[in-house]
């Protein structure tokens, strides 16, 4: 694949995979992933998330995401509502204790089944 100037000939998913590879090659102790898998199909997203689980061990990772599949395994999830932190906890805790998180999760789960 010819990359071109600033990755112009790459798809959004290819650019995301390249950016993730560069981040992990740097072996930075802190990673910020902003919608890191948003341009990927579900199969590629699953493969990237499997690799991420191994690569983030011992690192501090801040993940900004709208897909619950991206954050499900996080040790701490912050739920924002109207610009403020509305809740925090693990996925399991938030499903059990937070109506906003639970509702959003159920909506997204229902949409993915449709």
Image: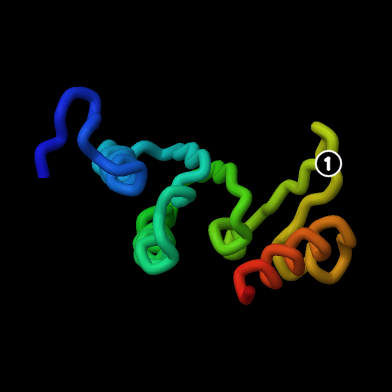
**Color style of the picture:** rainbow
Image coordinates of residue 66 in percent, x first then y, are 62, 50
Q: At 67% across and 70% down in the image, what residue appears?
A: 109
User: From the image, which quarter does the N terminus lie in?
Assistant: top left
Eyeballing the image, is 28 above or below 97? above
Q: Is residue 73 left or right of residue 107?
A: left
Q: Which residue is the extreme one toward the left?
A: 2
Q: Which element is circle 1 on? A: strand
User: From the image, which quarter does the C terminus lie in?
Assistant: bottom right
Q: At 82% across and 63% down in the image, what residue appears?
A: 103
Eyeballing the image, is 74 above or below 17? below
Q: Determine which quarter of the picture holds residue 28.
A: top left
Q: Which residue is the extreme one toward the top?
A: 5
Q: Which residue is the extreme one toward the bottom?
A: 113
Q: Is residue 34 left or right of residue 111?
A: left
Image coordinates of residue 74 in percent, x first then y, are 59, 58
- The answer to whether residue 24 is seen in the rendering is no
The residue lying toward the viewer, choosing from 86 and 111, is 111
Q: At 43% across and 56% down in the image, what residue appears?
A: 57
Eyeballing the image, is 26 above or below 90? above
The residue lying toward the viewer, choosing from 58 and 5, is 5
- The answer to whether residue 19 is seen in the rendering is yes
* Residue that badge 1 annotates: 81
Image coordinates of residue 12 in percent, x first then y, are 35, 42
Image coordinates of residue 52 in percent, x first then y, are 40, 57
At label 1, counting other C-alpha atoms closer than 10 Å, the crowd grade (few under 14, some 14-19, many 20 or more) is few
Q: At 81% across and 40% down in the image, what residue appears?
A: 85
């Amino acid at each position: 694949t010819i990359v071109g100037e600033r990755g112009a000939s790459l798809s959004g998913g290819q650019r995301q995979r390249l950016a993730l590879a560069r981040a992990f090659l740097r072996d930075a102790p802190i990673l910020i992933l902003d919608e890191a898998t948003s341009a990927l199909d579900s199969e590629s997203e699953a493969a990237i998330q499997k690799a991420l689980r191994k690569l983030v061990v011992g690192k501090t990772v801040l993940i900004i995401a709208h897909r619950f599949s991206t954050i499900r395994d996080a040790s701490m999830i912050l739920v924002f509502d109207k610009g403020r932190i509305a809740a925090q906890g693990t996925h399991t805790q938030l499903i059990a204790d937070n109506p906003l998180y639970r509702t959003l999760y159920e909506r997204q789960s229902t949409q993915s089944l449709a």
